[in-house]
Amino acid sequence: MTDAPTPLEDAAEDLVIQAARLVRAVRRLEGDLPPAGLRTLSVLDEHGPMAVTRLAELDRTSQPAASTLVKGLVARGWVATRPDPADGRSRLVDMTAEGRAVLADVRRRNARAVAARLADHDAADLHTAARLLREVLVTDLADPTQEGTS
């Protein structure tokens, strides 16, 4: 049996739950855009060009599934592949200008939808919430040595 959660742990649990719900809610706004494709663009935006194997690891999917997804994104013109200068047997996946534009458009639309529901709040409150999330995400949550490093 575990100890009762602290008030900070209770608040953190609520933050995790609400953040996940927000992500699901904005995904519903994306219409016919493929969620896996947008997720891949987001990973590339956050981490930069990478091999399909690394993309699969970060997206918690199989390498064959990631390869299929990348082929579809290449066909849409959202990503391109190029030889990996560090490994001649591998290719790097990177966003194209069109992929960056698609991701920026989706993010703008999502932000407008969220802002419309929070019109009665001060922008400073939203900046504080975003700062707190960035502090959580700046470290690897799976690494116990990084606790309390924000």
Image: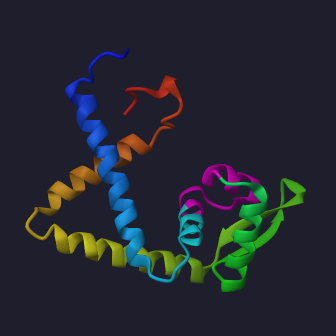
Camera-nearest residue between 14 and 134: 14
Way the structure is coloured: rainbow
Residue occupying the far front of the picture: 1
The answer to whether 100 appears left or right of 26 in the picture is right
Please give the name of the residue rendered at 24% of the width and 30% of the height, measured from the top-left corner.
Answer: 8
Which region is colored magenta? 43-60
Percent x, y for residue 9?
A: 28, 30
The answer to whether 45 appears left or right of 149 in the picture is right
Note whether 106 is above or below 16 in the view shown.
Answer: below
Q: Quadrant of the C terminus?
A: top left
Please give the name of the residue rendered at 67% of the width and 84% of the height, measured from the top-left corner.
Answer: 77
Residue 78 on the magenta span: no
Residue 46 on the magenta span: yes
Camera-nearest residue between 145 and 18: 18
Give the main secondary structure, helix, strand or loop, of the magenta stretch: helix
Quadrant location of residue 22?
Answer: bottom left
Note whether 86 is above or below 100 in the view shown.
Answer: above
Total count of labels: 0
Note whether 99 is above or below 63 in the view shown.
Answer: below
Camera-nearest residue between 17 and 140: 17
Percent x, y for residue 142?
A: 53, 33
Percent x, y for residue 16?
A: 34, 45
Camera-nearest residue between 109 and 32: 32
Please give the name of the residue rendered at 43% of the width and 78% of the height, measured from the top-left corner.
Answer: 30
Quadrant location of residue 27?
Answer: bottom left
Residue occupying the far left of the picture: 120
Percent x, y for residue 118?
A: 16, 67
Please give the name of the residue rendered at 27% of the width and 76% of the height, measured from the top-left corner.
Answer: 112
The answer to whether 65 appears left or right of 148 in the picture is right
Q: Quadrant of the N terminus?
A: top left
Quadrant location of residue 109?
Answer: bottom left
